[in-house]
Image: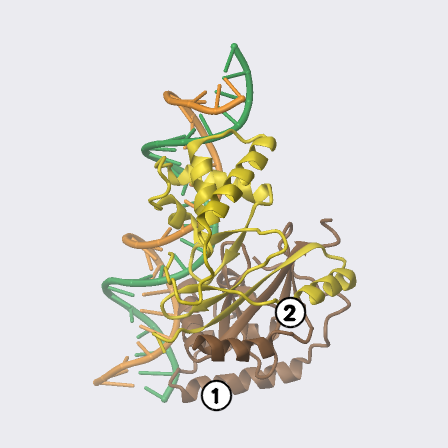
Chain colours: A yellow, B brown, C green, D orange
Amino acid sequence: MLHHHHSSTCRHHDTAAAGKLAAELLDRARSAGLRRTKALENILSILVEAHQPLSLADIAESPDLTSGADKATVYRVLIKLEELGFIRRLGLHDRSTYYTLIHAGHHDDYLICTQCGRIQSLDISCPVEALEKQIETTTGFRKLYHELEFYGLCPKCA
Amino acid sequence: MLHHHHSSTCRHHDTAAAGKLAAELLDRARSAGLRRTKALENILSILVEAHQPLSLADIAESPDLTSGADKATVYRVLIKLEELGFIRRLGLHDRSTYYTLIHAGHHDDYLICTQCGRIQSLDISCPVEALEKQIETTTGFRKLYHELEFYGLCPKCA
DNA sequence: ATACATGCAAACATTTTGCTTTGGC
DNA sequence: GCCAAAGCAAAATGTTTGCATGTAT
C-alpha cells in the first residue's frame, strides 16, 4: 500500500507537463492498437502524476480513477502498458507488485522504510549504468535493466 | 521456484567450510534462545549450501529438509532467522519471497532472466556501498542496506 | 459489425495464523 | 514440567482468469 510523504526534498511537480506526458503516452498506446478508454486515460494520468511506484490496489482505489474501473480492468491495462514498455514492475518487500513509469534517460531508485513501508524516490545519479553494460557483454544477457532499492529505518521509525 | 544453473563462472563451493558455517550459525541461534531442532539444522544447511536465494517452497520441498518439516514450520524458522539478522528477504519478480544468507562483508547482487526466471549470483564489486553511506547521512535513514538486481534475457531465451 | 475492453465472480498461489500436540531443555 | 516448536488445517492476501456484456472503432 502507498504511503504518501511529500517531504521538502520533493522536486517541483509540473502538472501541465504531466498532462502533456499522459497525452503523449495515450497517443502512443493508441498507435499500438489500444482503444481510447476512460480507464486507460485515468491509469496513465495516475502513473504520470505519482512520483513513486504504485501497487495495483493503489491505482484501483485512487480517487483519480474517475471511471471507477474494476481491479481486473486495471490489472489488464497494466499488463498491456508493461508489454508496451511504458511501465516496469518492481517488488518492494510487501506482498504487492508495484508499477512505475519508465522515463527515457531517467531511472529512479528507491528508499524504503522497513518499518512503516514509506517509499521515497532517490534523485541520485545511479552508479550502476556502466556496470550494466559490462555485465551485458560478460554474461551474454540482453536488454538489461536493473532495480536498486535501499532499505532501512526512516527517521520517524528509528 | 528455483532454477539451477551451475555455470562455469561458479565459485568453488567448499562443503567443509559450508558445514562449519552452518554449525556456527546454529550456535549463534541457540545463544539467541532458539532450540536445537532438526528443522533448524536442516534449514541452516540448506541456506548455507544454496548459492542463490531460495523461496519458502524451495526450502520446504528440498530433499535436504530431511526432517520433512511442514511449510508453516519452515516459514516460522525463516521469520526467526530474519529477526536474528542471519538472512534477508528479497523479491525477484515472481510471486514468491526469496531468502538469502547474509555473509559478513560480502553482498551478492543478482542477474535474473525475465523469460525463464533463471537466477545467477553476480560476483561483482558493488559500486553502491559508498552511495549507501551518503544516503544515510542525507536522509536520516538508519541501518541501510540495499538490494540490486539486473533483469534481462539470458542467452538461451534471447 | 467486429473486436477489444469491462465487470463480476470464481480460481489460484502464496503467505500467515489458530490451535492442539510434541519435544527440547 | 514448562514453554518453544511442529503439524495440520483454515484464513487471509493479492493476483489472475472465465465468461457474458458493453463499447470504441
Q: Is residue B121 above or below residue C12?
A: below
The answer as to whether the residues below labels 2 and 1 share one chain is no
Judging depth in this view, the residue of B95 and B59 nearest the camera is B95
Q: Is residue A62 above or below residue A139?
A: above
**What is the crowding at mark 1: few (fewer than 14 residues within 10 Å), some, or many (at least 20)?**
some
User: Where's residue A9, x and y in %?
Assistant: 44, 67
In the rendered image, is residue A129 in sight?
yes
The residue under label 1 is B27
Q: Measure the C-alpha gap from mark 2 to mark 1.
A: 39 Å
The residue under label 2 is A127
**What is the crowding at mark 2: few (fewer than 14 residues within 10 Å), some, or many (at least 20)?**
few
Judging depth in this view, the residue of B43 and B142 nearest the camera is B142
Q: Residue at x 47, y 55 (%)?
A: A53
Q: Is residue A144 above or below residue A23?
A: below
Q: Quadrant of the C terminus of chain A?
A: bottom left
Amino acid on which disc 1 is placed: Asp
User: Where's residue B142, x and y in %?
Assistant: 44, 79
Q: Secondary structure at mark 2?
A: loop
Judging depth in this view, the residue of A156 and B13 nearest the camera is A156
User: Where's residue C3, x and y in %?
Assistant: 55, 22
Q: Is residue C12 left or right of residue B18?
A: left
* Host chain of mark 2: A
Q: Secondary structure at mark 1?
A: helix
Amino acid on which disc 2 is placed: Pro
User: Where's residue A58, x and y in %?
Assistant: 38, 50
